[in-house]
Image (spheres, rainbow, N blue to C red):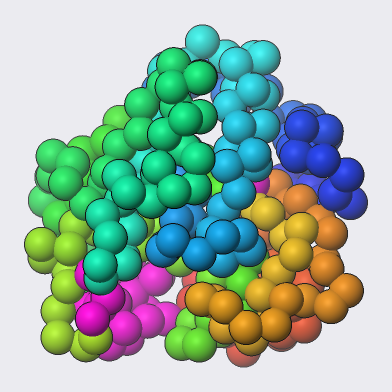
Amino acid sequence: MELAEIEFTSYAESVKSVLDGISAQKQLSRQKAILIKPNLVNASPPPVTTPMACCEAVIRYIRSCSKAVIVIGEGCGDSDLETDALFEIHGYTDLARRSQIKCLDLNYAPLVKKSNSECRVFPEMRLPKIAFTHYIISVPVLKAHSISTITGSLKNMMGFPPPKYYSGQFGFWKKAVFHQEMQQSILDLNRYIKPDLTVMDATIGLADFHLGGDHCSPPLNRIVAGFDPFEVDRYGATLLGFDWRAISHLQR
């Protein structure tokens, strides 16, 4: 099964159930190295950022079926804070210590240069080497977005590009160059690196704006998982009340 969704009860129970629903253990058992990518865009608490408890449940599931080395990776876009500070603020530093894994700041990770002539905005990109050596599990929170309409698994990959090359002149955000042509930028980025598995936290949902504003009312109360990030994000768009066909980065 490619996509599963379940009503949220607790992260421990619901993450396990939704991953069982897509038989994730079959793929995870074959992996040697896994990178978990939450959305830690800034210091705001969930649902702006991915709850530590959600990623903790993912780690426990992986360890129930796999001996893979696990890394939590993020590269924040906050203009005033570094990723390590956000790991600390959101409880990931403590989680890593308890779980005996590492937190990696993708903004400063060793890079590799890639090229793809099909990418209109980014025919070349510099990206962390680890994105090409590890199985990527995207763990986004579902939110509306002021430019891309929604932010889910695909846009969560913006944590990978280093600010040194992608800050640009389109705003104060560390990766502001992506604001120039956001929809196409998301597509280009996911031609280079795409999540292998997504666990989407749609327990609450942000209805209007990705950095705050109204929560979905009632809360969406869902955990969604799938191997195809396009399908997961399309389902997420529907949960937020959008027609995914009108969101260009979801049209492949």
| Residue 184 is at least partly visible in this image | yes
Q: Is residue 184 magenta?
A: yes
Whether residue 97 sits left or right of residue 191 in the image: it is right
Whether residue 99 sits left or right of residue 47 in the image: it is left
What x and y, as percent, mark residue 155? 45, 66
* The one of 119 and 161 positioned closer to us in this rendering: 161
Question: What's the residue at 64%, 22% (across, down)?
Answer: 60
The image quadrant that residue 236 belongs to is: bottom right
Q: Is residue 191 magenta?
A: yes
* The one of 231 and 238 positioned closer to us in this rendering: 238
Q: In the displayed orientation, state which residue is furthest to the front.
A: 89
Q: Is residue 62 above or below residue 167?
A: above
Whether residue 27 sits left or right of residue 252 in the image: it is right
Instruction: Count how many numbered circles sit on residues in the image.
Output: 0
What x and y, as percent, mark residue 250? 56, 74
Q: In the displayed orientation, state which residue is furthest to the top.
A: 67
The image quadrant that residue 176 belongs to is: bottom left
What x and y, as percent, mark residue 34? 44, 28
What x and y, as percent, mark residue 82? 26, 55
Q: Which residues are magenta?
A: 172-199
Question: What's the residue at 35%, 34% (across, down)?
Answer: 103
Quadrant for the N terminus in the image: top right
Whether residue 120 sits left or right of residue 31 in the image: it is left
| Residue 123 is at least partly visible in this image | no
Question: What's the residue at 57%, 53% (across, down)?
Answer: 50
Q: Is residue 31 above or below residue 16?
A: above
